[in-house]
Image (cartoon, rainbow, N blue to C red):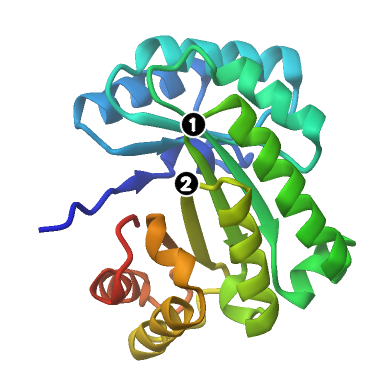
Amino acid sequence: MKKISLTDVTLRESSKGQENSLSFKEIIETAKILDKLDVDIINIAPIINEKVDTLLVRTITSAVKNSVLSIPVGITKESVDIAWKAINSAVKPRLSVELPVSTVQMEFNSGLKATNVIDLIDSLVSRSKELCNDVDFSALDATRSEKDFLINALTTAINAGATTVTICDTAGLLMPHEMDVFINSLYESIPSLKTVPLAVRCSDELSMATACAATAIRAGATEI
């Protein structure tokens, strides 16, 4: 029986300045609770203010003893190094390279060209792997990307050393049967995808996130 890993994004989402954002103390206490509950992976917020956020991340790392701690690394090699410096004392650190792979997110939201994104995937994943054994590549808005480009992006990440690949339905537009077709088509097109854990991140715009996640597991995903 395959193991399904669960990633909790509470601490990450609490950093977005919403009304329900958590205080420093609440973040630490939440991290302790999640760790006590044996959550497999705890997603934390990226480093924005290096001095303040590094202190927060280091405090979290001292509180978490069992769960993997995953932190986004930004889009430069320097930001990778900053993220690693903050999280390297964790018992189980993970560096997460997150880049858009759909045209709308690459060009209009991020101002990146497709060729630049492929180069960034290669350089950021490679640098992350030099520092940390556990490296995730998250393909943002993957379900709205061009298939050939997505195949190139995922293949590049795996070849560069990614130990987990995350497919993001960022817009939350897929229905469960579409998720099944989508995941199976990726496995058919990318043989190397079978060598690393596949994760899915589903938005809930259509109230179908749970159903899509369950369908993705049936199709081969092992982390949600």
- Residue in the picture at 37% in, 13% down: 63
Q: Residues within 10 Å of mark 1 (few under 14, many from 20)?
A: some
67 vs 73, left or right, is: left
Instruction: State the image coordinates of residue 126 (x, y, percent, origin top left).
Output: 67, 40
Q: Residues within 10 Å of mark 2 (few under 14, many from 20)?
A: many
Residue furthest toward the left? 1
188 vs 58, left or right, is: left
Q: Are marks 2 and 1 in contact (CB under 8 Å)?
A: yes
Element under disc 1: loop
Q: Which residue is mark 2?
A: 163
Instruction: State the image coordinates of residue 22 (x, y, percent, origin top left).
Output: 49, 29
The residue type indicated by label 2 comes to Thr
Task: Tell me which label, 2 or 1, sits earlier in the chain.
Answer: 1
The residue type indicated by label 1 comes to Asn
112 vs 219, left or right, is: right
On the image, which quarter does residue 199 sit in? bottom left
Instruction: State the image coordinates of residue 143 (x, y, percent, origin top left).
Output: 56, 78
